[in-house]
Amino acid sequence: MDLSPFEDDNSVSCRLVSEIPEVCKTEDCCLGIDEAGRGPVLGPMVYGICFCPLSRKEELKDLKVADSKTLTEAERENLFEKLDEAKSYVGWALQILSPNTISTCMLRRTKYNLNALSHDTAIDLVQYALDSGVQLKEIYVDTVGPADKYEHKLSQRFPGIQVTVRPKADSLFPVVSAASICAKVARDRVVKGWNFTEDLGEVDTDYGSGYPNDPKTKAWLLKYLDPVFGYPQFVRFSWSTAQTLMDSKAVNVHWDDDEEDGEKAAQRQSNKSMLSYFSVSAGGNDQNATHQAHRFFTERRLKSLNTL
């Protein structure tokens, strides 16, 4: 699994794919869908599909794939290697959704929640398989939201394909277990080798599981919260855990918008409008305004570094 396309720019999402087995283009196939990393406040969410011919379902089962959450990291790595060795009849594709992508989607003015993002990602991966020539006849999915509604949605989107959506599908159907393993292995590798593009010095990588209720994760979030610039892009800043810490520990900033006079609103909150640092004073010029803004952010940055 070559993660370099994502590691080159982990601020955006990325698709990784295996070769499409020739047999999958000529025989009827089944496909499983699952994800890894839906709940953590740190790192990406990875959606995975795995597919193989219906005639070789039992061979996939014989690999003893299982729900990735029930396996150790070493067991998952070993099973992924077995899936890779079975590339003559097993194929996979992954969509790595960066923390930045997740947060940006969830904080749009027009709400785009995690369920909608998950559904759209799954649909895009199935469409990729079809566009690549995979002869899909059956799709098995671990549910996101109400199973019956999701099943109806996918059946409408992909007529002629039998769709089965079930809770805990990753423990019921081997092809979903295989997708779960691919997704989890990719996420584990990405998180372990995360490239911090921000200037944070030597980063402490002991951030625990990444889940909001993990004490190590909470401690890491507190340590790397910059009072002005917030969090590095490793953090899903749309998560309530991150927002609560920013609200209580970071500098209070009012952002001007079109709905209200920014200067007056800021004054009511004893703040200074962000845009005021970019305004041109009487007798001044654009260069002076830029210098004012640069000085403000530099001073704030140095102050925040001294508090870490």
Image (spheres, rainbow, N blue to C red):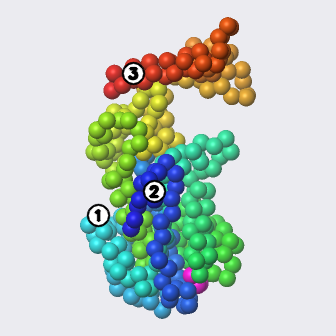
Question: Dot 2 lies on which element?
Answer: helix
Whole-percent x, y for residue 100 in the image = 51, 46
Comparing labels 2 and 1, the label whose residue is closer to the camera: 2
Residue 242 included in the magenta stretch of the image: no
Label 3 crowd bin: few (<14), some (14–19), many (20+), radius 10 Å: few
Query: What is the distance, in whole Å, between disc 2 and disc 1 at their CAs?
Result: 21 Å
The answer to whether residue 215 is visible is no
Mark earlier in primary sequence (2, 3):
2
The circle on residue 6 is 2
Picture coordinates of residue 271, whole percent (x, y): 57, 16
Between 142 and 53, the one nearer to me in the picture: 53
Badge 1 amino acid: Glu
| First in residue order: circle 3 vs circle 1 | 1
Residue 135 lies in the magenta stretch: yes
What's the residue type where badge 3 is placed? Leu
- Front residue of 297 and 273: 297
Q: Left or right? Give the position of 215 relative to 198.
A: left
Give the mark nearer the N terminus: 2 vs 1.
2
In the picture of the structure, the residue carrying the numbered disc 3 is 302
Q: Amino acid at mark 2?
A: Phe
Which residue is labeled 1 in the image?
73
- Between label 3 and label 1, give the one nearer the viewer: 3
The magenta span reads 134-138
Residue at 39 percent of width and 67 percent of height: 1
